[in-house]
Image (spheres, helix red, strand yellow):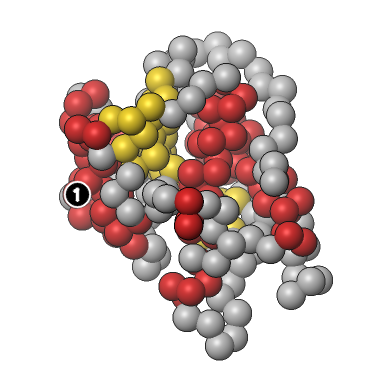
Amino acid sequence: MDHRPPLQLKNQVSAPTYKLIAGLGNPGPEYLFTRHNVGFLVLDAWADEEGEAFHDERSRFSKFVALDSGVRLVKPMTYMNESGKAVAAWLDWLKLTAADLLVVVDDVALPLGQVRLRPEGSHGGHNGLKSIESHLGTDCYARLRCGVDATPPGWAIERWVLSRFRSEEEDALGRMIQTARLAIECCQNEGIAVAMNRFNGLNPIDSTQNK
């Protein structure tokens, strides 16, 4: 199933705001298209648009794409709870700081279809963000949260985020991936303040009708 609609993106006219963009998820086919892997899905869509494939970088515990702009797209292969290990290794190798980092991550506090950018902030209980904060010693890094809907009654949150998107959610997922990609482009070209005003709080696609 294809969740990655093509985008017509503007040419960048200045240096990108974020030089390292990390999409969080878990490696392995058993986690493909699970809610926790939205970060991977967004970066996969970006790489596809650029005609690029991810390469292994075992010394930095990840897969990556180096774009012509100089931006690195990174998918940690450490499993979610150790994401910070890979992110810190990349920042160190590239001689970057947390200010150069944008993390793409799932969020059960947002409806499916909605995204939210923040220039910094708490991990909100997300284990991937907890790991990054622990390894970097700061929560002062940007993040793009992508809604995967709230945990249903009677479900443990761990079971929910590791569940696959349902077939009736595929359209909403594809549109959210597109929105996330456009939000990142806006960050890169116009800055995160402009992107927050433009993309935060947009009405999500209604994904509740088939629950």
- Is 142 drawn above or below residue 188 in the view shown? below
Q: Quarter of the image containing the C terminus? A: bottom right
- Tell me: 150 left or right of 36: right
- Is 86 drawn above or below residue 32 in the view shown? above
Residue 189 in sight: yes
Give the image location of residue 50, x and y in percent: 57, 20
- Is 153 drawn above or below residue 15 in the view shown? below
Q: SS of the residue at dot 1?
A: helix
Residue at the image position 30 percent from the left and 59 percent from the top: 81
Q: Nearer the viewer, residue 43 or 107?
A: 43
Give the residue at the far front of this rendering.
Answer: 29
Residue 204 in sight: no
Give the image location of residue 88, x and y in percent: 22, 40
Give the residue at the far right of this rendering.
Answer: 209
- Tell me: 93 left or right of 22: left
Q: Nearer the viewer, residue 4 or 193?
A: 4
Query: How many marks can you see?
Result: 1
Residue at the image position 49 percent from the left and 65 percent from the top: 162
Badge 1 local density, few (<14 within 10 Å), some, or many (20+)? some
Give the image location of residue 130, x and y in percent: 29, 59
Q: Nearer the viewer, residue 166 or 43?
A: 166
Give the image location of residue 132, x and y in percent: 28, 50
Residue at the image position 53 percent from the left and 82 percent from the top: 155
Give the residue at the far bottom of this rendering.
Answer: 154
Residue at the image position 44 percent from the left and 73 percent from the top: 158
Say which residue label 1 marks.
135
Q: Amino acid at mark 1?
A: His
